Image (cartoon, rainbow, N blue to C red):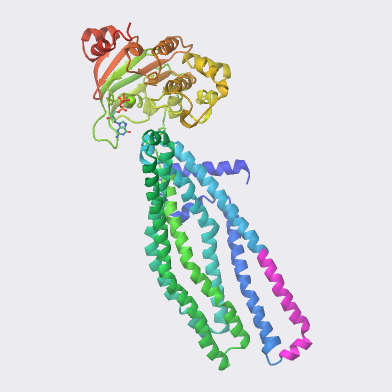
Amino acid sequence: MNVAKEQRIEAELRKEAQESTKRPGRIAWLWMNMKGVRGIYIIAIFGTVVYNAMQLVVPHFSQKIVDEFLTGENAADNLVNHKDVFINLLIAMVALTIIRVVVVYCDCMTYEYVSQKVLYRVRNILFDKIQRQDMKFYNTYRTGDLMTRVTGDLDAVRHMLAWVIRMIVEAVVLVGSVSIYFFYMDWRLALSLLAVAPFILGIIVLFKNRVAPQHRLLREKLANMNTIAQENISGNRVVKAFAREDYEIAKFDKSNADYRDTNIQTAFTWLRYYPYIESFANLLGLILLVMGGAFLIAGEITMGQYVAFSGLTWAIANPMRQLGNIMNEFQRFAAASAKVMDIYYAKADIMDKEDAIDHPGRFKGKVEFKNVSFQYEDGNLPVLKHISFTAMPGQTIAIMGETGCGKTSLIHLIPRFYEPTEGEVLVDDINVADLHLKELRGSIGLATQDVLLYSDTIDGNIAYGDGNITREEVVRFARYSAADEFIARMPEGYETIVGERGVGLSGGQKQRISLARALAVKPSILILDDTTSAVDLETEKQIQHSLKELDFECTKIIIAQRISTTKDADNIIILKNGEIAEQGTHEELIGKGGYYAELVKLQMGSEVA
Ligand code: DGT
Ligand code: MG
């Protein structure tokens, strides 16, 4: 399939996943995602039917050979006079076997191709889905769990297409066609052989009821183990700092053992039912021996027919034995696909409205909070209460307050990471909820409180928001954020690769790169959340100076603890328990003699010189 067609199908499926209000059944969902490869999948199923039916033709030929050339009344005669028929029968048997091998080979390749294709597609859609979720989603799902869904769970879905369905078709074809053939030879013997089927089916149903919850449990345990591993690896510094390696190893061991035990239990569940299935399957041979023998002696069936019956009982017995396996895999698919579909059909609460307002061109950068209150969905207390203030284009607004008073929560409402529970947040006099997220967020430069850099070059990290900017510009923004000097001193300068999360850089260095990254999108609104907290005073002064000299107009909203960072702001907002306790300029607030004035007194002499 060509790339354009694949992309078109993927886009259609994404649209469906986004817009559908009802989740289809898991098989219908699978079928939907097979768009474009359904035709060849059906051919593959047809191939399975063919090669299984072919397996039956060989015993049919052996029956003919036995009856007409070995044991029949005219056997010796036939062997002499119709030698050509005998040889033709032998050649046909060999040819059929070769053809069967070729069909099986092509068939397996097709199943593999289709299943990989669907796997690739669904994985892309899942990643796309995960990318577009809002903050709430990331608060809900643990990383290890999400990783399990796009890897292990998805592979169980692939396995369904590549193996389980094939096995089901195989079983149905074998049992079905052999039954017909048996009935055609002798219906009484056929009926006595098939009498075991209802018992085996009964056992399988009992087994299914037992094993289904176990597969769900198994899947949870795997996700749990992955989460522990992932959290441990990304939090390795904390582990080392507290010398908790042994504790972590024990914790992982426990989860690993838990997973192992659940796996063993699941296997044992099958083993509990297996002897019954096996006994019934073996009963077939006994029935054939007794009943078939009696029929043969009574002359009801020929020797050739007896050979055909006995040569084909496996075609009933094997699928019966396989049923447990198939059911097991099917339940694994059921548990995994439910997890995959959770993400596939996840809907972000925060999305573009259908009638979102287009805002081509640059925002002026006016930010206004109108009586905004906010509470986290999983929290039980309001975090922000009746916040109102306005930042005019180009102004600098400082936000200060004790830790936990709601500063970060407040600025997260501007790029619409969360929705206020009351009131509205406006940018350029438009409610942010009415803007296209891409346009809104594209015009905001945000340096978050906990800095996350990608494992990429410093240049790549700074240019993250706008891949088109030149090296000169990257250097210019690094200068604005007082980062150029230390970057230039690094062995490979801007080409230095920083590790995952910026390993290899100091806290202050990371903050400065994060500031350069925020500036590099030339935002209309620059939001700095404690961005210079780890930077020394001298460097900070330099940064403050360059922020005033930016060559593009930009409203600045700066969260900081230091008076030196905030004193020149056009408006300083003091938050207390989610409410605005004071606001005004440096001089006005000193005059008020409140929290800010206290802070000035405390920090006097050291910084505000
Ligand atoms: P900081 O950075 O330590 O100076 O503190 P702020 O002022 O940035 O505080 P903020 O906005 O992070 O948190 C305000 C309150 O909201 C605090 O009680 C913790 C709570 N909170 C923060 N994030 C979440 C969240 O994702 N879910 C819930 N339920 N509560 C949150
Ligand atoms: Mg904060």
Residue at the left extreme, as displayed: 593
Q: Quadrant of residue 576?
A: top left
Q: Which SS does the magenta portion mostly show?
A: helix
- Residue 139, image x and y in percent? 36, 37
Q: What residue sits 57% from the left and 90% below the top?
A: 296
Q: What residue sits 46% from the left and 50% below the top?
A: 153
Image quarter where ligand 2 lies: top left
- Residue 26, image x and y in percent? 45, 54
Left or right: residue 591 compared with residue 368: left
- Residue 49, image x and y in percent? 59, 66
Magenta stretch holds residue 280: no
Q: Is residue 359 above or below residue 129?
A: above
Q: Is residue 152 visible?
A: yes
Q: What residue sits 41% from the left and 19% below the top?
A: 525
Left or right: residue 608 compared with residue 154: left
The tally of labels here is 0
Residues drawn in magenta: 75-101
Q: What residue sits 62% from the left and 67% below the top?
A: 51
Q: Is residue 490 above or below residue 567?
A: below
Please state which of residues 452 and 463 is positioned toward the viewer in this rendering: 452
Q: Quadrant of residue 47?
A: bottom right
Q: Is residue 24 visible?
A: no
